[in-house]
Image (cartoon, rainbow, N blue to C red):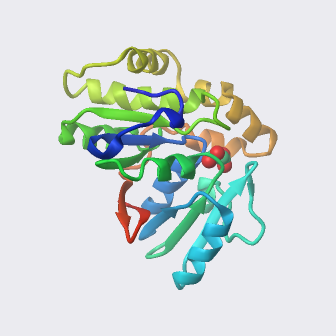
Amino acid sequence: DVLFYPEKLKNVEDKVVVVLDVLRATTTIATALAAGAKEVYPVSSIREAFSLKKKIPGALVGGERGGIKVPGFDLGNSPLEYQNLSGKTIILSSTNGTKALTKASQAKNLIAGSIINAKAVANYLGRLNLDVIFLPSGTDFQFSLEDFAGAGYIISLLAQQKKIYLSDQAFVSLKLAQNNSPEEVLTRSFHGQRLINLGFQKDVEYCASLNLLDVVPVGRVSEGRLVIES
Ligand code: MLT
């Protein structure tokens, strides 16, 4: 199934949940892990991000509000900033994506999906062989085109491997992905336009790079906190 909004998520304990924030948090998480980061802690609030940084020596704190790097953070939310991170711990706080991830933290299996790692995620889901819920992070509690289509690119790759049952919403998401390139979708989307107007055209192009990275960010709860590793 593919949900429209994060707030519809219920009873996740026995479910596989793929959270998507294609623009840009889950793309940034995949990029950070591919760049050697040891782990990423998604946190909802800025205060939580600063307080966790004090507890983890050497951790870098990244994220945005309104698309712009938070004052005092080491990094913004641009995936292009997340390079050469060997062994680093990243604490990430973004407007919608990290909130959706923490909301889904109790899932049986939690995966951070995006377009850049669509194939790796599809292969992982194929091996799990369980029902999957795709959870778009949305934009300010609104439907987000890029996350809904992002689920469709993963479903399309999964459907090439095996016969799968699609809910009505999953079917629409697949058709959307089959009929539009990632570049078209991301450039057309409300949030894509907002990022372009903020000067992040290169981020939008990068986030549309289908199957660029072979990394599967997987969540687990450690000492009451969600941590994502590859
Ligand atoms: C979010 O969590 O809302 C996004 O990742 C915002 C952004 O593009 O930085």
Res 98 seen here: yes
Q: In which quarter of the image is residue 77?
A: bottom right
Position of residue 121 in the picture relative to residue 130 (left or right):
right
Q: Depth check: give the residue in front, 172 or 222.
A: 222
Res 83 seen here: no
Residue 67 in picture, x, y percent from top left: 73, 49
Q: Depth check: give the residue in front, 195 or 64.
A: 64
Position of residue 189 in the picture relative to residue 82 (left or right):
right
- Rendered position, 108 above or below 130: below
Q: In which quarter of the image is the N terminus?
A: top left
- Rendered position, 161 above or below 75: above
Please count the marks in the image: 0
Residue 148 in picture, x, y percent from top left: 51, 28
Q: In which quarter of the image is residue 200?
A: top right
Residue 46 in picture, x, y percent from top left: 67, 64
Which residue lies most toward the front here?
Answer: 11
Residue 135 in picture, x, y percent from top left: 46, 36
Position of residue 128 in the picture relative to residue 9 (left or right):
left
For image coordinates 57% across by 31% down, the residue present is: 146
Q: Depth check: give the residue in front, 212 or 148.
A: 148
Position of residue 121 in the picture relative to residue 21 (left or right):
left
- Rendered position, 61 above or below 160: below
Q: In which quarter of the image is the C terminus?
A: bottom left
Which residue lies most toward the bottom here?
Answer: 57
Q: Depth check: give the residue in front, 184 or 162.
A: 162
For image coordinates 81% across by 38% down, the residue present is: 197
